[in-house]
Amino acid sequence: MEVLSKVGDALLSAAFQWLFQKLDESIKSHHSQQEEVLAELQGWKSYDPQIRALLKDAEEKQITDSSVKIWLDDLKDLAYDMEDILDGFQADVQRRNLTTKPHQTSTSKVTLKCLPSFKHNDSACDSVTISKVRVIAQRLKSMVDRSRTLSLVSSTIQVRERTAGAAARTVPTTPQLESDVYGRENDKEAILKKLLNDECSSRGEVFCVLPIVGMGGVGKTTLARLVYKEVEQGRFNPRAWVCVSDQFDVMSITRNILEELTKARCDLNSLNLLQEKLKGELSGKKFLLVLDDVWNEKGNLWDNLKVPFKSGAPGSKIIVTTRNMGVAQMMGGKNSVHCLGVLEDDRCLSILARDALGVENFDAHPNLKNVAQEIVKKCKGLPLVAKILGGLLRDSEDIDDWKYVLNSKIWNLQGIQSSTLPAGLMLSYHHLPSHLKQCFAYCAMFPKDHQFNKDELIFLWMADGLLKQQSGDKNQMEDIGHRCFSELLSRAFFQHSSNDASRYVMHDLIHDLAQYVAVETCCNLENMLEAKKEENAEKVRHLSFYCRWLDISKRFEVLNKMKGLRSFIPIVPSLGKNYLSNTVVHDWLVKLTCLRALSLQSYNIRKLPDSIGDLKCLRYLNLSETAIETLPESIGFLLSLQTLLLQNCYQFSKFPATIGNLNDLQYLDITNTQSLKAMPQEIANLKNLLIFPKFIVGKTEGLRLSDVKNLLHLRRYLSILDLQNVSNNLDARRSNLHMLEALDELVLEWTSDFDDSRKGSDIAEEVLSSLRPHQNLKKLTIGCYGGKQFPSWIGDQSFCKLSYLRLSGCRNSTLLPSVGQLPALTELIIEDMNAIKTVESEFYGRGGHGAFTSLQMLKFHNMLNWEKWAFLTDTGVEFSCLKDLEIANCPKLTGKLPSHLSSLINLVIKGCPELTCSSLSLPSLKKLCIAGCNQLLLESMVNLTSLTMLEISDILGLGSATV
C-alpha cells in the first residue's frame, strides 16, 4: 500500500518556489536587526537552485524507490519548518511596527509589555533565532548530501504541471444532475419494486432493510439517491438520509436521524432520551430512512440502533449502502440484498464523454473514440473513475492529452492492481495543478464522510497559505479559493452532500486518496489513536477530531508531541454545548506557536487566556457557538489574523479596543450576537474587512455612521443598527454607502423606541435620504424607520438587481414608497406600519401599466389601520407574475383585492374581518387559507379550478375545515 502515497508529490516543486520567494521578501525586509541572521538566511537561499533542480528527478523516482520517497517526506517536513520560521519573522516585524506606531494608545502599550514575546531582551531572542536558522541550514545541506547517495540527477528548474485541457478549461457552475446517471435503470427499478411492496407487513414486520452492496466507486450512493428522490413524498413520511461511515456511534447516528427528521438541533446527551424522542417522531408513521456507507459488522450495535424503528408503521423501509456483504446480511438478510455490479464499458464511455466534452458520445469526435474506449477499459466498470478522468480531460480535444492519460506509467505501478485505490484516481490527482494538490491534500484532515462548508474550508486554506495571489491578480483570496473549490468540485474530488445542499463531501475512495498523498501531515485524532500511530505525531501539521460532550485533557496529551501543529479543528456533530478541559486551552494550545487555524467551536468557553496573543502566526480563530463573553486585549496582537468567527455567541458583549490593530483581518462574523450592543471606534481601522455583518452606531462614543467609509471592501451582507443615534445627516452623507459595490444585502434599522417627535422624524428622513446604497444591491430591509415618507431612491429603476424589499415597523410612514417599477423585484414584505390607511396609486410608480412585473411574493402583515387598497386597473396587470399573496392581521381593510391574478398559486388571508370582495378569478390557485374573515370573502372566490388544498377557520357561520 505504500506505493499509493508515492504518487503526485510534484507539488513540492511549486511549494519550494513560493518558499524561496518568501525568503527573498524576508531578506529584503530585514526581518532581523542582526547581520548574523541575515547572513544565515542568505545561506538558505544558496540551496534554492540545488534543491529545486533535484525535485523533478526525485518526484519520478519516488514511485519505485522508497528511499527517495523518504527523502521527499523529510524535505516536506523541512519546508514546513522553514516556513514557520519565516512567518515568525514576519509576525515579529508586525509587532515591532505596532510598538513604534505613532499615536499608539496607552492601553495597547501596556498590553504589549505584558506579551512574553516582548518581555525578553533582544539578545536572548536573537540567540534563539540564530540557532533555529542555523539548524535549518544544516538540514538543507544534509538533504543535498543525501541526494548524492540516492543518485538524484539535477535538471533544469521548471515548475510545470501537465494538466490536460487546462488552457481551455471551464469550470461548471452547477453540479451534474441525477438524470445524467447512466446504466442503472434496471437497478433503480429493482430497488423501487422492493420499496413499494408490502412483504414485510405480511410477515408482521414493521420495517424492512434493503441493502445495496457493491465495491467502492461503483455508484451505491448515487443509486440510493436516485431512488430516494423518485419515491413520492406521500408514500413515506417522514424521510431521512444519514451518512454513517466507519464510526458506528449509536448515539451520534440516532441524534443525526432525529435532527434530519425534525430539522432542528437536539442537545440531548443520553441514548435513552434520544431513542424515546425518535420513537415519538416515528410512532405510527411509515418512514423511509437511508443509512449511507455502513461498515459496522457488530450485530449488537445494529440491534441497539434499530430499537426506535420498531415504533413506525408497517411498510417502513431502510435503505443501506455498504461495501461489505456481511454487513448487508446482518442488517437485512440474504434475500433482500441488491448487489450492484460494475458498469458496462459503453456506459462508462458515455460518462467520460459527458464529463470531458459535454456530449453524450464521441460521434462528433471520432479521432478520440478509440483512445477513449481504451481508457474506459482501465476504469474497470467504476463510474467514479470515469467521471474523475473526464474532469481531468475536460475541454481537451487534443489527442495527445488523451494518449498521455492512456499511456501513463501510473496504470501499471506495482501494487496498484491489489490496492483499494483505483489507478485512475491517482492518475487524476497526479495531474492536478500544484495549488489544487495542496488544497486537496489538506482535506485529508477531515474524517471520512465529513460534510464540510465551502466558505469554512476556503478560510482554512487561506490560513495555511495555500491560496497564492499571482502578480497582477486583483481578486481577493476568497475569490481565488472559490475558483480552487469549483475546480475540485468539477473534477469530482468533491461532491454535493446528499442531505444538505449547502455542504459537500468527498467520496470515501477520494478520501482514501487524500490520506495517502498527505501521509502523516493531515489526520483525524480518532483515526490516529485507533491505528496506534502516536509515534508519528511530531509530523502532524493539521488535526481534526470529533467534538465530545466532555473532552478531558487526557484525550489531547498527544498535542505535546505536535510542536509544528498548524490546524486544530473540532468536528462538531450537533449544535449543543460541549466542554473542553481548561488545561487544553490555557496550557497546551497556547504553546503551539505554529498554529495557523484554531477552532474552539461549540465548547462552553467563557474567556480566552491572555496568552492567546502568543500565537503570532494565527490566521483563523473560530469561537462560534461558544459562551465567550468578551475577548482579551491580547487578541489585538494576533496581527496575522485573517478570520475571526463569533457566530451564535449569544453572550458575547464587548470587543477590546485593541481589535483595531488587526490590519489583516478580512472576516469578522458576528452573526447572532444579541448581547453585543456597542462597538469600539477602533473597528473603523480594519480597512481590509470583507465580511462584517453588523455595524452598531454609537450615541456618544464608539462607531460613527461616517466610519462606514473606511470599510469599502465589505461584501455580501451588512446590517447597520441603532440609526437613531445619528444626530444629523452629515454623518450619513460621509458614510459613502453608495461606494460598497460588492454588497448584496443591506439592513438599515432604527430601534422601536426611537424619538417620535417631529424633529426625530425629520432627522430620520434626512439620514435615510443620504444612505442610498450602490445599485448592485439585491436585498434591502428598512426597519423601525421614523420618517413620514420614504426617499425617492428606494424605487429608482437603476436598482436593476434589487429582488427583495422589506419595510418593517415604520410606524410614522403614511405613504408607501413607489417601488412598482423596480425591474427585478420578486419579493415584497410590508409589515407593522400602523400609519398606513390607504395603499395609493403612487405605490405602483410612474410606469403606468405593468407595475410589479417581476413580483412573485407579496405580504402585508399587521397593518392595523389599513383601510383601502387602490389599483391602477381592474385587470390585475400590475401583478402579472404574482404567485404568493399573504394578508394577515389587517382588521380595518375593506374593499377589494386585485381581481385577476392569473399566476397566483398560494393565497393566505387571516385576521381581516371587514374584507369583502367582488368575484376573484384565480385560475392557477392551488392553496387557499382563510382564517378570521367574513363569510362573504370566501363566497367571492370563483374559478378555482386548480385548487388542491383549502384551509378555513374562524369564518362566521362556517367554523373550521381543511380539505
Image: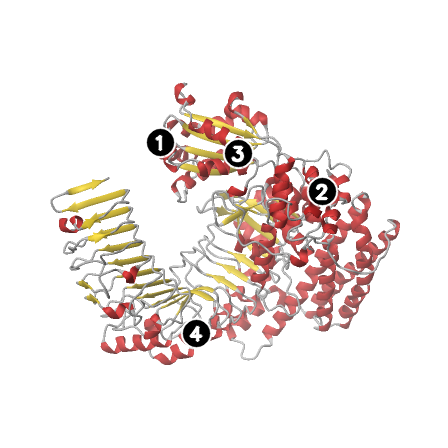
Question: Element under label 3?
Answer: helix
Disc 4 from disc 1: Cα separation: 54 Å
Q: Are marks 1 and 2 in contact (CB under 8 Å)?
A: no
Q: Nearer the viewer, residue 60 or 184?
A: 184
- Residue for badge 1: 285
Instruction: Work out how far the residue at label 4 is from the one at label 3, CA to CA, in angstroms.
Output: 54 Å
Which element type, helix, strand or loop, lies under badge 1? loop
Residue drawn at (60%, 40%) of the image: 508
**Viewer-side label of 4, 2:** 2
At label 4, counting other C-alpha atoms closer than 10 Å, the crowd grade (few under 14, some 14-19, many 20 or more) is some
Q: Which residue position is annotated with label 2?
A: 370
Instruction: Identify which residue is drawn at 71% across, 62% down.
Output: 18
Of 413 and 142, which appears nearest the observer?
413
Kindly report which numbered mark, 1 or 3, lies closer to the viewer in this rendering: 3
Q: Secondary structure at mark 4?
A: helix
Identified by mark 1, the residue type is Lys
Q: Nearer the viewer, mark 4 or mark 3?
A: 3
Most foreground residue, 58 or 490: 490
- How far apart are the alpha carbons under marks 1 and 3? 29 Å
Q: Is residue 448 above or below residue 876?
A: above
Cα gap from disc 1 to disc 2, whole angstroms: 54 Å
Alpha-carbon distance for marks 3 and 2?
A: 26 Å
Q: Amino acid at mark 4?
A: His
Q: Which mark is residue 738?
A: 4
Q: Position of residue 252 (x, y in %)?
A: 48, 38
Name the residue carrying label 3. Answer: 185
Crowd class of label 1 (few under 14; some 14 to 19; many from 20; radius 10 Å):
some
